[in-house]
């Protein structure tokens, strides 16, 4: 059975022979990444690199660090040449009246072509091919309106939020067509919706405002024969049932122990798959071999008791959270030794 077939059986809950694995280096890996589309501003990419360009500094004169403009037209800032930055001024931050004249990103055909050509024979690899969706539902709103405005908008301006989401949904569908043409099996949206203790918005706001868009996105993905993966940081337990109902197939959580692997497996293991490392904040950062190995085994066993709906993975940049290579290997070795169902 190929790696792709294993993941497909996991996603369809069709008697998979083992849990999935997606580890770095020479470790077991069932999933590889394929190209979707890179986006750019219609007027060009010249502000897309970190800089102190006057065209950006004039818009946020109070910010003293580096700046760049995203494909959505949001201005991101960072200090000390570290991190990927955060939005300091959204493209629609001055008011919803600019929505009619705001321009969506366009596909950067040159960059997307280079990315596709560089992927080589990924279609013949026998692996499950996953791609990233460069837009999201809540996160796009959060940046374009800035977080403070966006949260107020969910209560005070729901019609404008819907008008905005209708616009970006059209671009998402175009990107999904590219993903199918590129041979992807699944596509992941990156949409952080919570803090360490709760959602950014109420479950009712999710149900009435965001869930219909998740349902539409899921239907478009499934209609093209792909699976829907969702990455979200934060404690989003309260809306996971709604996301499953909307059609999310696989949840990518870097902190599965915020709610608990046992909870995810018991309550949702028959309806969804969880694509997770051993918890990066509660467990991996301890550097305690016994804690890491015991936690890895507990996570695997929790899902094995409920159909094995787990794809164990690496965090993509352990060094960024000060996890040493040998610590990550302790977790991988335990998972691989106990993967069979």
Image (spheres, rainbow, N blue to C red):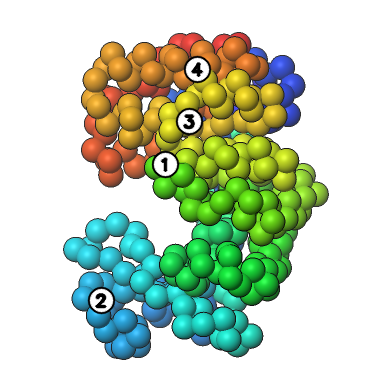
Whole-angstrom CA distance, mark 2 to mark 1, is 29 Å
Q: Residues within 10 Å of mark 3 (few under 14, many from 20)?
A: some
Res 259 label: 3
Closer to us: 212 or 47: 212
Residue 116 is drawn in which quadrant? Answer: bottom right
Q: Give whichever of discs 3 and 1 has the lower sequence position.
A: 1
Placement of the N terminus among the 4 image quadrants: top right
Asked if residue 171 can be seen in this view, the reply is no
Give the Cα distance between marks 3 and 1. Answer: 10 Å
Q: CA distance from mark 1 to mark 4?
A: 24 Å
Q: According to the image, label 1 marks what residue?
A: 197
Q: Residue at x 39, y 42 (%)?
A: 196
Q: Give the quadrant of the C terminus.
A: top right
The image shows residue 42 at horizontal and vertical percentages of 55, 81
> Residue 259 at what x, y percent from top left?
48, 30
Q: Is residue 123 above or below residue 180?
A: above
Bin the neighbour count of mark 2 within 10 Å (Cα to Cα): few under 14, some 14-19, many 20 and up. Answer: some
Residue located beneath label 2 in the image:
63
- Disc number lying in front (2 or 1): 1
Q: Nearer the viewer, residue 11 or 96?
A: 96
With 265 as the anchor, is 249 left or right in this view?
Answer: right
Q: Secondary structure at mark 2?
A: loop
Upstream in the sequence, badge 1 or badge 4?
1
Residue located beneath label 4 in the image: 300
Q: Secondary structure at mark 4?
A: helix
Query: x, y (%) of residue 113?
Result: 57, 64
């Amino acid at each position: 059975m190929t790696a792709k077939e294993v993941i497909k059986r996991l996603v369809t809950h069709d008697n998979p022979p083992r849990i999935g694995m997606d580890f770095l280096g020479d470790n077991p890996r069932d999933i590889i990444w394929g190209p979707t589309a890179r986006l750019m501003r219609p007027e060009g990419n010249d502000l897309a690199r970190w800089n102190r360009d006057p065209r950006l500094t004039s818009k946020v004169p109070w910010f003293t660090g580096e700046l760049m403009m995203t494909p959505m037209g949001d201005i991101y800032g960072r200090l000390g040449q570290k991190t990927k930055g955060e939005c300091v001024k959204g493209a629609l931050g001055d008011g919803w009246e600019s929505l009619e004249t705001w321009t969506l990103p366009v596909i950067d055909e040159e960059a997307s072509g280079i990315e596709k050509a560089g992927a080589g024979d990924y279609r013949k690899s026998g692996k499950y091919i996953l791609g990233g969706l460069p837009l999201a539902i809540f996160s796009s709103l959060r940046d374009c309106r800035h977080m403070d405005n966006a949260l107020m908008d969910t209560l005070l301006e729901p019609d404008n939020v819907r008008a905005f989401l209708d616009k970006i949904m059209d671009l998402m569908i175009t990107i999904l067509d590219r993903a199918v043409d590129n041979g992807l099996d699944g596509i992941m949206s990156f949409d952080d919706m919570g803090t360490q203790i709760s959602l950014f918005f109420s479950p009712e706001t999710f149900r009435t405002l965001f869930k219909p868009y998740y349902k539409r996105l899921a239907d478009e993905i499934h209609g093209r024969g792909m699976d829907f993966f969702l990455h979200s940081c934060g404690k989003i337990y309260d809306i996971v049932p709604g996301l499953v109902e909307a059609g999310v197939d696989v949840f990518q959580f870097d902190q599965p122990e915020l709610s608990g692997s046992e909870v995810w497996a018991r309550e949702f293991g028959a309806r969804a798959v969880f694509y997770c490392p051993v918890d990066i904040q509660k467990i991996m950062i301890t550097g305690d071999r016994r804690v890491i190995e015991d936690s890895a085994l507990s996570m695997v066993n929790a899902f094995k008791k409920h159909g094995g709906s787990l794809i164990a993975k690496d965090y993509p940049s352990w060094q960024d959270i000060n996890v040493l290579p040998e610590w990550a290997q302790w977790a991988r070795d335990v998972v691989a030794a106990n993967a069979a169902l």
